[in-house]
Amino acid sequence: MGYLENTLGLEAKLAPWAGADTLPYNLRSSYEVQELRLLNSDFLVCLAREAGQTPASIEKQMEWLERQTGRRAVYAAESLASYNRKRLIERKIPFIVPGNQLYFPDLGLDLREHIRKAKEEVKKLAPASQALVLGVILRRFEPLNTFTATGLAGRLGYSKMTMSRAIDELKTLKLVEVSGIGIHAGHRFATTGRELWEQARPYLRSPVKKRIYLAEWSQGLDFQAGESALAKKTMIGRPQRTIWAVTSDQWKHLQASDAIHIIPEISKDSAHVEFELWHYDPALLADKPIVDPLSLALSLSDATDERLQMAVDELLRGVSW
C-alpha cells in the first residue's frame, strides 16, 4: 500500500481477503474488504464504496468484523469531513484517508499530513454540484427522492468520484443530508424549490466560463442563451447578436468548421454571433431551444444594464418553484 509505505517507511502488504464473500450483504455492498499485514500485525481494511456512513454506524460495523474475524478492522475512505475524523478518533476507530491522514491507535500512530479545508470553506459550488441543485429546483430530478453518488453519476453523466465530491460539498453547506442507515443509506435535499434557491444562491456561479465572438454562424445550435434567451422569455428586445450556449466538447468540434471566424473581444460589437462556453451541459437542465431560467439568470447576474436586471427579475417571477 503505497501511502502507508511512503508515510511510515515500512513494508505494508495489502491483498484481497478470502473471507470477503462470506460477509453479510450490507457489509459487502458498503465496503471493499482487504487484508493488511503491518508491523507483524494483521488488519482488515474496509474501503468505503459510498460516502455518508456515520461514525456510530462505522463503529458498529468495524466492531462486528473484529468479533467475527479476530482482526482489527480499519475504516478507509477517499475523503472524510473533519468532524467525522474527530468522532472516529474519539471512538478510537483506526482509519486511513490516503494522502491526508492515518490513525492507528493500536500502533500509536496519528499522522496528519494535511487537513483538507475545501469541504469546510465552500465559496462557490463546483459545476456538478450546481447542476444537481438547479436540477432539483427545476424538478428535472425528483426533489424528494434519496440518491447516491453512483446513481447520480449514471443520471448526470459525471464520474462517481465527481458526484461523491458534489454530495460532500452540498452536505458541508447543509443543503443535503444523509437519509436512512446501512445498505439503505442515501442522501436527500434538506429543502427544495424557492427555499433551496435562496439558501444556495450565495454559492451559485455564472455557468459561463468563456465568451467567444464570431463574425457569423449560419447553423443553428441546441440552446439559445444570454440576452437571446431572455428576449424569448420576457418583454426585453432582441440583442444585436444571437447568443448560444455550448459545452467545451461542442466547441472543440465546432472549431474544426471552416465557418468559424473568431472576432477579438475588443471588437465584439461587430460580432453577429456569440458562443457561451458553459461549465455544465445545458441539456441537463432544459429542453431545446432555450437554456433553463435559473442558469440564464445567473449568467446575467453581473449585468449593469437596468433593463436587463428588470427582465431577469421578470424571468424569475415566472419560475414554477
Image: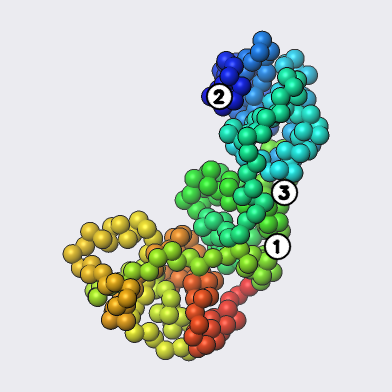
Q: Residues within 10 Å of mark 3 (few under 14, many from 20)?
A: some
Q: Residues within 10 Å of mark 2 (few under 14, many from 20)?
A: few
Q: Residue 113's mark?
A: none
Could you say which is closer to the camera, residue 36 or residue 219? 36
Q: What residue is at 54 percent from the left and 56 percent from the top? A: 126
Label 3, label 1: how far apart the Cα atoms are: 13 Å
Q: Position of residue 261 (x, y in %)?
A: 22, 69
Q: Residues within 10 Å of mark 1 (few under 14, many from 20)?
A: some
Query: Picture quarter containing residue 12?
Result: top right
SS for dot 2: helix
Q: Residue beneath label 3, please?
A: 179
Residues tagged 2 and 3 counted as in contact (Cβ below 8 A): no
Q: Position of residue 5 (x, y in %)?
A: 57, 21
Label 2, label 3: how far apart the Cα atoms are: 37 Å
Chain-order first, disc 2 or disc 3: 2
Position of 18 relative to 310 (above/below): above
Residue at the left extreme, as displayed? 258
Report the quarter where the N terminus lies: top right
Residue at the right extreme, as displayed? 90
Could you say which is closer to the camera, residue 109 or residue 306? 109
Q: What residue is at 30 percent from the left and 57 percent from the top? A: 252
Numbered disc in front, either 1 or 2? 2
Q: Residue beneath label 2, please?
A: 6
Q: Residue beneath label 1, please?
A: 191
Type of amino acid at the residue the image marks with label 3: Ser
Type of amino acid at the residue the image marks with label 2: Asn
State whether residue 45 appears in this view. Answer: yes
Position of 312 relative to 85 (above/below): below
